Image (cartoon, rainbow, N blue to C red):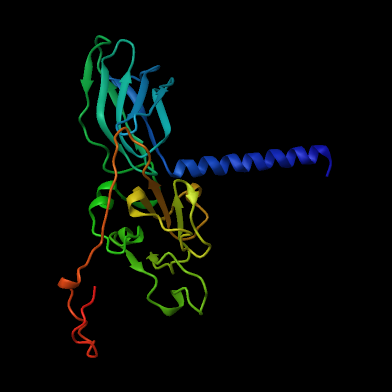
Amino acid sequence: MNTKGLAFLALLVMAVWTVSASGQVDVASATLKGTVTDKSDALVMGATVTATSNDKGISRSATTGAEGNFQIPLLPPGAYKVEVEARGFNKAVNENVPLTVGQSLIYNVQLSTGGVTAHVAIVEGGQLIDVERTQQANSISTKQVENLPNVGRTFQNYVYTLPGVASSTAPRAQFASRVTGFGTSGLSIGGSNGRNNLIMVDGGENEAGSGAPRYDVSTEAIQEFQVNRNSFSAEFGFTAGTSLNIVTKSGTNKFHGSGFIYYRSDATSARNAFDTLNPGQKYA
């Protein structure tokens, strides 16, 4: 291969890597976008929209264009303080705008005229229907992860709380056994066999080739995750089944942690009802 061919191949590899990397980052984040107008619904150009994470303190900004639109991509999931400023208008502030993983939230703002030092608090809730997302998806929030009972301590157990989800391990052929030798995710959504599911962690692939995760993610490390059932875009791809998109917890401005201990005393444990050989034995 000549020099020109090698140069073209190198550029092609770089382009594919860039697209893949950007796609991986995007699926583990959220996007805030919308339009800024005034009271007469006229578009406001040059307005500055700033989103600041309430937990991590990171801040990102965007400026509206000629059509009054703005977009702030790649925001880590969480609650944000959103501020909108423009010359000749009162400043608009919303202290709590929740963003979930994979979400593209439309956040339209209407500014009122006045002094630049005025402060207008926005308390309206978010949209009930995500018109930007084509796929059928559910999100498991931080509150659910922290409060739902989970005996097995696996993230798959949370998915079973969603409608239309069943276990794919019931038939013998689905076990990691002598039949196939491969494990599965254990989740059947929309009638799938559990081998067509893709599990991603923070935008990186965590799948062993048969739908089973390469490694289990501790429930204590999970912030939230998204279950894309079907009709999702190519950025969630590499699967014909369901795409599970997990986001782990990262550093915040407050110190936090958890501790657990599992203890069962012999004094409170009954004898196994089927053990007739050692009737005096107690079991922990």
For the point 16% across and 72% down, the residue is 267
Q: Quadrant of residue 98?
A: top left
Q: Position of residue 4 (x, y in %)?
A: 80, 37
Above or below, 118 against 140 in this view is above
Q: Quadrant of residue 37?
A: top left
Q: Position of residue 123 (x, y in %)?
A: 20, 30
Judged from this view, the residue extending furthest toward the right is 2
For the point 47% across and 46% down, the residue is 203
Q: Is residue 121 left or right of residue 33?
A: left
Q: Is residue 50 left or right of residue 181?
A: left
Above or below, 39 against 134 in this view is above
Question: Which of these two is toward me, 99 or 37?
Answer: 99
Judged from this view, the residue extending furthest toward the front is 280
Give the total number of marks visible in the rendering: 0
Question: Which of these two is toward me, 95 or 272?
Answer: 272
For the point 35% across and 28% down, the residue is 51
Q: Quadrant of residue 9?
A: top right
Judged from this view, the residue extending furthest toward the bottom is 277
Q: Position of residue 206 (x, y in %)?
A: 48, 55
Above or below, 4 against 47 in this view is below
Of the 4 image quadrants, the one containing the C terminus is bottom left
For the point 51% across and 61% down, the residue is 208
Above or below, 222 against 64 in this view is below
Question: Which of these two is toward me, 202 or 104?
Answer: 202
Question: Which of these two is toward me, 266 or 221?
Answer: 266
Of the 4 image quadrants, the one containing the N terminus is top right
